[in-house]
Image (cartoon, rainbow, N blue to C red):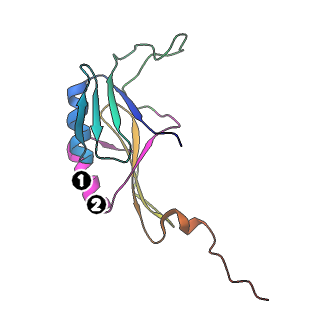
């Protein structure tokens, strides 16, 4: 099985450490000189300082942009108490990106971090995502 490591580009490392440790109750694991490991989630998160407009790879059509942006990949933080998690991330500087929504599996709040990266807060209810899977019915026979 592959090990998951999460890397988040930011343009201000100190501000990013403050945000992610305050918003998600993570803590600094190791400091690698110019980048930082955060621990406390199921996978370590690495904050990588990269200048705005710098190229993410050779031949990239656009440079890094830390204004609010959309990408098909984002993080979901599963929380036990959505209301307190929302208050915590907003106090840390997250911006709401829509109304709170309710689904069969739980409640979902969309946000952006101070670097424009989208993330969700998710509070499961009932059986969580299993609410979307039909329950097996005993066969008659």
**Magenta stretch contains residue 81:** yes
Q: Residue at x 62, y 74 (%)?
A: 135
Circle 1: element type: helix
The residue at which mark 1 appears reads as 87
Q: Which residue is drawn at 32% across and 60% down?
A: 82
Q: Is residue 71 depicted above or below 40 in this figure?
A: above
**Picture coordinates of residue 58, whole percent (x, y):** 52, 10
Instruction: Inspect this view and state whether residue 94 appears.
Output: yes
Q: Quadrant of residue 116?
A: top left
Using the numbered discs, state the Cα–Cα distance from disc 2 to disc 1 in whole angstroms.
6 Å
Q: Name the residue under label 2.
A: 83
Q: Which residue is drawn at 41% across and 39% down?
A: 118
Circles 2 and 1: CB atoms closer than 8 Å? yes
Task: Determine which quarter of the picture holds residue 84.
Answer: bottom left
Q: Nearer the viewer, residue 50 or 96?
A: 50
Please report the bounds of the magenta region as a residue range.
Answer: 70-97
């Amino acid at each position: 099985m592959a090990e998951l490591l999460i890397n988040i580009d930011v343009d201000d490392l100190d501000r990013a450490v403050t945000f992610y440790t305050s918003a998600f109750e993570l803590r600094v694991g190791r400091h690698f000189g110019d980048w930082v490991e955060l621990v406390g989630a199921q996978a370590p998160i690495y904050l990588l300082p990269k200048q705005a407009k710098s190229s993410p790879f050779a031949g990239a059509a656009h440079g890094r942009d830390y204004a609010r942006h959309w990408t098909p990949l984002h993080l979901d933080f599963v929380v036990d108490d959505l209301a307190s998690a929302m208050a915590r991330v907003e106090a840390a500087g997250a911006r709401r990106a829509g109304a709170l929504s309710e689904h069969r599996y739980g409640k979902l709040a969309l946000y952006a971090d101070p670097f424009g990266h989208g993330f969700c807060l998710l509070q499961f209810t009932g059986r969580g995502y299993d609410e979307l899977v039909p329950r097996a019915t005993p066969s008659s026979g």
